[in-house]
Image: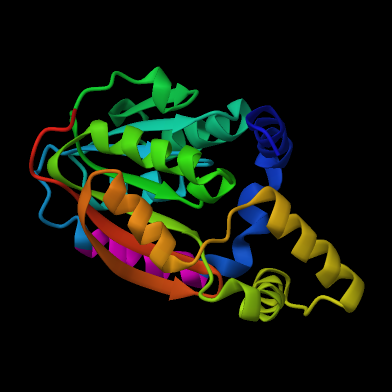
Amino acid sequence: MDAGQLQQLFDQQAGQYDQQWQRLRPLQSALFFLVEQCLQQLPKQARLLCVGVGTGEELLYLAERFPHWQFTAVEPAAAMLERCRQKAQAAGVLQRCDLVQGYLDDLPATASFDAATAFLVSHFLTEPQQRLAFFQQIARRLKPAALLLNADLACAEPALTMQAQISFWQQLMTGQQPDAAKLVQLMQSYRQDVAVSEPSELQWLLRQAGFAQVLPLFQAGLMQAWCAQRGATELA
């Protein structure tokens, strides 16, 4: 699935996106709690970059808990970003947000952010070099020693456990285990449309992109998260 198809898909899903993920709210709450702890030491006037912000769940959570932070949110799907804007306005935090429809390339490549989030974004880049370039672009926009909180779909020993993991993940999202025909369809989709990497591969990509320290933070089903610290030196 190319970038244009993904953008169209998320535009179509924007109105129901939050409802679709409602069953996974407990996992989201646990992840956001851990993210909050990682970011406690940021400056009072910190600037946060939210990559692929979607409808803005992490932005709203952090804006409520850190009332002096400024946020730059990047999202290619216009309908998703509009939903984020509406929610930020309703929460009274829109004045602290710069919402950018587009990609990281649409931001200045300067190290100006104290931290970044990228939740369930990079696994849509199915080629390792694309994914590496994505993390490199984030690293270039972070100050030295700044943090990236990243979550993606990942599975250890995917050839052996992928089917069972996908079946369980589908049960988490829908409340029902997929039947045999549905599982075959899901397996094909996960192989073609997303990169469900081994955790060690994703950690290696983060280090190659300029993150000197990569701390495993959270795991639930197929979703795994890391707290990665950008190297202390300037990047080329």
Q: Position of residue 231 (x, y in %)?
A: 14, 46
Residue 43 falls within the magenta-colored stretch: no
The quadrant of the rendering that contains the N terminus is top right
Q: Is residue 157 above or below residue 137?
A: below
Image coordinates for residue 136, horizontal then vertical, percent: 32, 37
Q: In the displayed structure, does residue 150 sit left or right of residue 183?
A: left
In the rendered structure, the answer to whether residue 188 lies left or right of residue 26 reads: right
Bounds of the magenta segment: 26-37
The quarter of the picture where the C terminus appears is top left
Q: Is residue 220 left or right of residue 80?
A: left
Side of 223 relative to 113 (left or right):
right
Q: For this rendering, which residue is in front, 47 or 223?
A: 223
Q: In the rendered image, is residue 121 in sight?
A: no
Across and down, in percent, residue 216 comes to 31, 69
The image position of residue 7, as x and y in percent, is 65, 31
Which of the 4 quarters of the picture holds residue 106? top left
Q: Residue at x 50, y 23 (%)?
A: 101
Residue 33 falls inside the magenta stretch? yes
Q: Relative to the observer, which residue lies in front, 192 or 5?
A: 192
Q: Is residue 203 visible?
A: yes
